[in-house]
Amino acid sequence: MSKLNSRDKFLDFSDYGRSPGKLFANSISHSRITPIHVTLLFGLSGLIAIYCIIQGLYWWASFFIILKSIIDAADGELARINQTPSYTGRYLDSIFDIILNFFIFTSIAFVTKTSIYYAYIAFFAVQLQGTLYNYYYVILRNLSEGGDTTSKIFEYKAPRALPGEKQSSVNTLFAIYYLVYGFFDKIIHVLDPEAFKVKSFPSWFMTLLSIYGLGFQLLIIAIMLPLNLIEYIVPFFILFSVFIIVLIGIRRIFLR
């Protein structure tokens, strides 16, 4: 199952890890490695990147950030190849993402001696940017015939477990997911409550929107680190949030 059918696909700047992720997923598809194992592996890669930031090893930090993005794409691809979608994997993936993002910005603040409060504002900004991307992308995926509907537009209660996973695990992970993401979801829904009524989003809009995808955000960090621009990462992502209003304005005015 693809996330989108061929008609709705678009150039996604945040999805550069998809092709190598597919290669990795195909290479392990007949092994005992599960998508959950791959999710744990991308979490480990992210932790190594954070350690490298703290140690000032910025080239290595960039390497592991990019590797994390590739492995992050591989867990979902492995689930689709083996036809084993799960809410457990979907929520665990998202929980790992937000935890890693938090510690990436915390480590940047530590190294640059930036106020931790500014780092938290940047973290909040990054999460809000990513939530906007996910909001519109999930709407498109649910509209796309034959697309992946594991992610829902509005998630207020735990879904029924899919075959092969425990309902208790789904319930627990959903509760954590809702705790850490629910506030960001509500903000975006308030800013654009009518978006789900759109029949589709054109590819040019989704491509523009993809600058807010997590993969592209991490790519920006991975580029700035070895260029010794680490002290500008926090202010950059705070200012980068201005496009939230721009993108929502485009959607509300031109895409009804």
Image (spheres, rainbow, N blue to C red):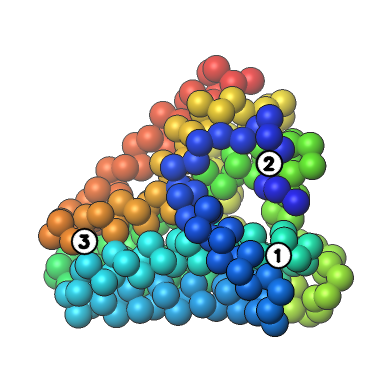
Residue at the extreme top of the image, as rendered: 254
Mark before the other along the chain sequence, 1 or 3: 1
How crowded pointer 2 is (Cα within 10 Å; few <14, some 14-19, many 20+) is rated as: many
Q: CA distance from mark 2 to mark 1?
A: 15 Å
Mark before the other along the chain sequence, 3 or 2: 2
CB atoms of marks 3 and 2 within 8 Å: no
Task: Please give the name of the residue rendered at 13% of the width and 60% of the height, measured from the top-left corner.
Answer: 228
Q: Position of residue 30 (x, y in %)?
A: 71, 74
Q: Which mark is residue 196?
A: none
Q: Which mark is residue 225?
A: 3
Which of these two is toward me, 145 or 138? 145
Q: Does residue 126 sit above or below 248 in this rendering?
A: below
> Would residue 68 appear left or right of 75 to someone viewing this image?
left
Q: CA distance from mark 3 to mark 2?
A: 33 Å
**Viewer can see residue 174:** no
Q: Position of residue 19 (x, y in %)?
A: 53, 53
Q: Position of residue 46 (x, y in %)?
A: 41, 73
Task: Please give the name of the residue rendered at 55% of the width and 17% of the height, measured from the top-left corner.
Answer: 254
How crowded pointer 1 is (Cα within 10 Å; few <14, some 14-19, many 20+) is rated as: some
**Viewer can see residue 77:** yes
Which of these two is toward me, 102 or 17? 17
> Would residue 143 appear left or right of 20 to someone viewing this image?
right
Quadrant containing the C terminus is top right
Task: Please give the name of the residue rendered at 48% of the width and 75% of the height, measured from the top-left corner.
Answer: 43
Q: Secondary structure at mark 1?
A: helix
**Which kind of residue does numbered mark 3 sit on?**
Leu
Q: Which mark is residue 79?
A: 1
Which of these two is toward me, 201 or 256? 201
Q: Quarter of the image holding residue 8? A: top right
**Which kind of residue does numbered mark 2 sit on?**
Leu
Residue at which label 2 appears: 4
